[in-house]
Image (cartoon, rainbow, N blue to C red):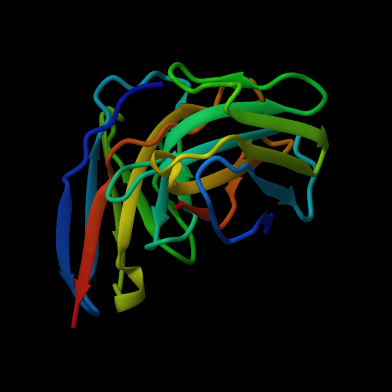
Amino acid sequence: GAVVSQHPSWVICKSGTSVKIECRSLDFQATTMFWYRQFPKQSLMLMATSNEGSKATYEQGVEKDKFLINHASLTLSTLTVTSAHPEDSSFYICSARDNRAEQYFGPGTRLTVT
Amino acid sequence: DAKTTQPTSMDCAEGRAANLPCNHSTISGNEYVYWYRQIHSQGPQYIIHGLKNNETNEMASLIITEDRKSSTLILPHATLRDTAVYYCIVRVAGGNAGNMLTFGGGTRLMVKP
């Protein structure tokens, strides 16, 4: 089956620094990738839709200047959390859509901002 | 996409069938029913999906009512490893860029020894 990887699986950073999370589709090409965020005991919330070669589309309430998304190739999308604060601590999950429009999820990245 | 309603939590004895209901009374004719599950601290895992016919795969069975307003996911012989949050999602299939999966609250299934 289709595999999506994320790196790193967990990261701890200091407040004010930036963190980059990578999402890769390993055995298929994904023109569209999605980024979700999940707080403890809550459901996944869609943050943005990333399209290869174009600007990402952000959901209402998500700051595009804080959560920078780059989808430079058909197998890689990155999410950069800029000037991270403790309230950005969360579980970030990416998803990639194949050419049949099926979505496959990565294992998630746990971000802790101290 | 149509909204879904699921019980917040359910318990199931190990080895017994787990039947997880989902209500999607406003589903449109071109919307599929998808089921995913999320084991603690992992990404969601696809289980099964269907349009109107019942479906079965190696993981589970999906029973969709004739009017398509509700469905049931059946795990025939639940194991402790099936403890997870199960999400029922309805969405239009196809390559529309806006056609992403939107998650509701899901059902927290606890399989007990």
Which residue occupies the foreground of this view, A88 or B98? A88
| Residue found farthest to the bottom | B113
Which residue occupies the foreground of this view, A15 or A78? A15
Q: Quadrant of residue A88?
A: top left
Q: Position of residue A36 (x, y in %)?
A: 50, 38
- For image coordinates 33% across by 52% down, the residue present is B86
Q: Where is residue A34 in the image (x, y as percent from the top left)?
A: 60, 35
Asked if B78 appears above or below B41 in the picture, the reply is below
Tell me how many marks there are.
Answer: 0
Q: Where is residue B37 in the image (x, y as percent from the top left)?
A: 40, 54
Which residue occupies the foreground of this view, B110 or B70? B110
Left or right of B90 in this view: A92:
right
Asked if A3 appears above or below A15 in the picture, the reply is below
Which residue occupies the foreground of this view, A59 or B78? A59
- For image coordinates 55% across by 24% down, the residue present is B99
Q: In which quarter of the image is residue A6?
A: bottom right
- For image coordinates 15% across by 64% down, the residue present is B11
Left or right of A82 in this view: A77:
right
Asked if A109 appears above or below B110 in the picture, the reply is above
Q: In which quarter of the image is residue B84?
A: bottom left
Q: Quadrant of the N terminus of chain A?
A: bottom right
Left or right of B9 in this view: B36:
right
Q: Position of residue B31 (x, y in %)?
A: 45, 25
The answer, for residue B93, to whether it is visible in the render is no
- For image coordinates 29% across by 72% down, the residue present is B78
The answer, for residue A113, to whether it is visible in the render is yes
